[in-house]
Image: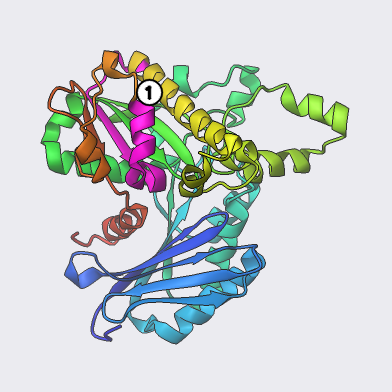
Amino acid sequence: MPKDKTYFLTINGGSSSIKFTLYNVDESLTPFLSGKLTGLGLPTASLCVNDSSAGEVTTEVQADNYQQAVAVLLEWFQQHLNINSLQAIGHRIVHGGHQYKKPQWVTKDLLKHLSAITPLDPQHLPGEIQLIEALEQQFPYIKQLVCFDTEFHQTLPNVAKLLPIPRYYFDKGIYRYGFHGLSYQYLMQMLHQHEGSRINQQKIILAHLGNGASMAAIKNGQSIDTTMAMTPAAGLVMGTRSGDLDPGLFGLLNRSESMTEQQFETMINQQSGLLGISTTTSDMQQLLQTRSDDRHAQEAIDVFCYQAKKQIGAYAAALGGLDTLVFSGGIGENVAEIRSQICEQLTFMGIELDRDLNQQNALQISSRQSRVTVWVISTDEELMIAQSMCDLLNLNH
């Protein structure tokens, strides 16, 4: 890490992993190195760092909990980063509640507010706050910024935002927020680079399909609906999250099995989705490898694709048509078989894939006959954080 350069550090803290990227501010936000700490809470975690000069290095670490994971990262930062060259640190924050709409510099008031709304997202917010506080203690003179995944969906109309419960709760900030906003912001930015201002007239569905999965319907360049709701557990079937459920399920399990609120939240966030249906794994590639001999693996794949297909049809109805479909996220970007299964029987909507382009994970995978343009775009949430830091510091990017 050269000492004569200025850098931004972005941190993307998830429930089971923490990603970070170091950007060279002097060279149009060029990534200098990136890393990912995975396996949080498992017997063996790993820290994989990809340096533009030294290549990729993976190290086994101890990270039984989030506190240990944060300690591992801080020690690595101290040993390998020139702290004096860091101009700012930026974080992805999953939930901003109803108070924060735009990127913010970290203050005591902001941390107090985030702590107060942790019931809205107990899976992510506590760890994200812990990261911010640890970095503030270790590097007190470096500014920290937070970017909210909920920001992108501020344009949701009330018809999509309201939950069908007593309005009293809406006034208390209980409504559909939507998430994966930084990913969707990047996808729209990339579409604009390829298509120009015409995307503002297009009817678009963005599908972020990974361990966390959601879709967003875009009209006039703005989000008009999205599958995740008050929390990131709602919507599509995900790796370990259930997606939408019958609201009577908790009452049933509480009465019949004495299931507590905490046990229910653990079940729907960590034991459901692909893992729950298959009983073996939340990894889509592993499910594809075993599905010929494992009926439960096949059913997990089928439910995932069926729910995604059904949602595309629903959003085409909400948009009044469809011009563009974008696949992103770990599954959406890399698993051609899943994209193909989702798009099967959607020719009546004008969606038709080119088999060879789809197998290649090409940028555009729709056939020449397709009335809907289908894209595969690798998302980059970290770059959106770095761009926000540039904006607030009045730097060009």
Instruction: Please identify the quarter of the rendering in which residue 65 is found.
Output: bottom right
What's the magenta region?
318-343
Look at the image and say whether residue 312 sits in the magenta stretch: no
Q: Which residue is mark 1?
A: 312
Query: How far across and how far down the image is residue 295, in percent?
Result: 58, 34
Q: Where 83 falls versus 337 (above or below)?
A: below
Please indicate whether residue 373 sits to the left or right of residue 167 in the image: left
Q: Residue at x 58, y 51 (%)?
A: 124
Look at the image and say whether residue 323 sits in the magenta stretch: yes
The amino acid type found where label 1 is placed reads: Ile
Q: Residue at x 51, y 48 (%)?
A: 283
Is disc 1 placed on a helix, strand or loop?
Answer: helix
Label 1 crowd bin: few (<14), some (14–19), many (20+), radius 10 Å:
many
Query: How far across and how far down the image is residue 262, in percent?
Result: 76, 43
Query: How far across and how far down the image is residue 152, in percent?
Result: 37, 38
Query: How far across and how far down the image is residue 95, in percent?
Result: 52, 44
| Quadrant assignment for the C terminus | bottom left
Q: Where 114 falls versus 158 (above or below)?
A: below
